Amino acid sequence: MMKGKKSSALQPGHIQPVEPKVAILLGLSFPIALFVFWNITLPFIASTSSFIIGVDVVETFAYLKEDVLNAMLLPCPNWIAAEERAFIRKSSSKSIRRVSNLNAEEFKNIVNTGEPVVVTDGMRDWPGLGELNCQSIISNYPDAKYFDWQAQESISLRDINKRNKYEGLECMAGYMNLQTPENLKYMQELMNNVRAPYFLFKDVYTAEPHINSSHPNLNIFIGTENTGVSPHLDETCDTFISAQFSGVKNWSLSWPISEEGELKWSKPIVFTLYPGELLFWYVGMRHHTEVVKGCSLSFSFQITTPAPRDYFHKLSKTVNSGSDADKDKLFKQTRASNANFLDTCNVIEKDGKSFIIARVLDEK
């Protein structure tokens, strides 16, 4: 008789059943072991490893751990990396300035210094305040095009409820660009809900130094709780107005500074914007937003006057004090495509008003 190969204990016929008591013990101990490993063992390894492999590597590992946890636990797709969240956590002790009952001269002086400001009664005479919200925009403009950040595609507002994996407005985050041909036809009707801020002149949304624009530079942002936009930089020279119609948003703002010859971002000012409030902020400012209550509907305008003259000159001097490599490193953190975009901005005077505008680089 031929001798066969020895059988293996791993063959199906030789698998021994696990005792019920052992199975229960394993089931109970595994979550505890995982908790101890994740919250005690890994931090201990990280803290001791910093002496061997360096703090930067350890921080990168910690960020990766947080990103993995967020991907598993958050109700909506994780929109902000752990490293960027850490930047926001290291916020400035300063609070944003909040004002009301402004006059034109007071506002002009604030803007000139480049101090971000919230005007708490800025929308006090706006017809749309208390009327416009996420649902009314979706119902009244079903064919308007909306860029969905989660899917990274443009869809009609009527199709918001048809998104894969989501019910209704769940995890909705994106914006309507009113300058596109598909949406421009809604501009006038939407602007009927808006007024020029009471401390600015009537044509502020379209004012230019040479000839007024035919329509405002307007984007409409819609987002639900647990969504937001990570810290980034808009490569434009304009001053921004964010008008909060519904929902509550957290913001952060920071700008380039030089410390001991090193270009870096200032510690961010973190604050909350409520319905009825206007936020003003300026060229070269890194910012993030996140919805913390309700469905947020906000209008974002870009204006050219009054100009943040003193702030812009100081900003340009600060940024240009660094080498090209320093500037590239600074703006790379914001995913900016052009580290020299500030060179395209210019402040001019016209008819008693100051404007900040973009110009061609070789313009004389």
Image (tube, rainbow, N blue to C red):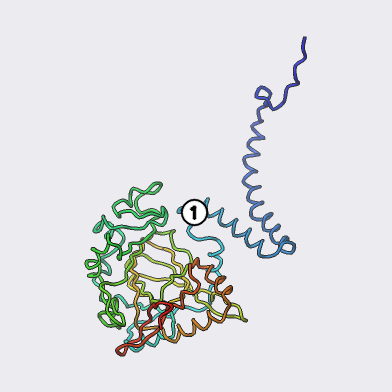
Which residue is found at the position 32% from the left and 84% from the top? Answer: 101
Q: Is residue 212 above or below residue 11?
A: below
Instruction: Assign the N terminus to one quadrant of the image.
Output: top right
Which residue is found at the position 44% from the left and 85% from the top? Answer: 113
Q: Is residue 40 above or below residue 102?
A: above
The residue identified by callout 1 is 74
Q: Position of residue 29 (x, y in %)?
A: 65, 43
Q: Amino acid at mark 1?
A: Leu
**Which image quadrant for residue 45?**
bottom right
**Which image quadrant for residue 229?**
bottom left
Kind of element beneath mark 1: loop
Q: Is residue 354 above or below residue 289?
A: below
Q: Position of residue 248 (x, y in %)?
A: 39, 66
Q: Position of residue 287 (x, y in %)?
A: 46, 70
Q: Can residue 112 be seen in the rendering of this structure?
A: yes
Q: Can residue 280 be seen in the rendering of this structure?
A: no
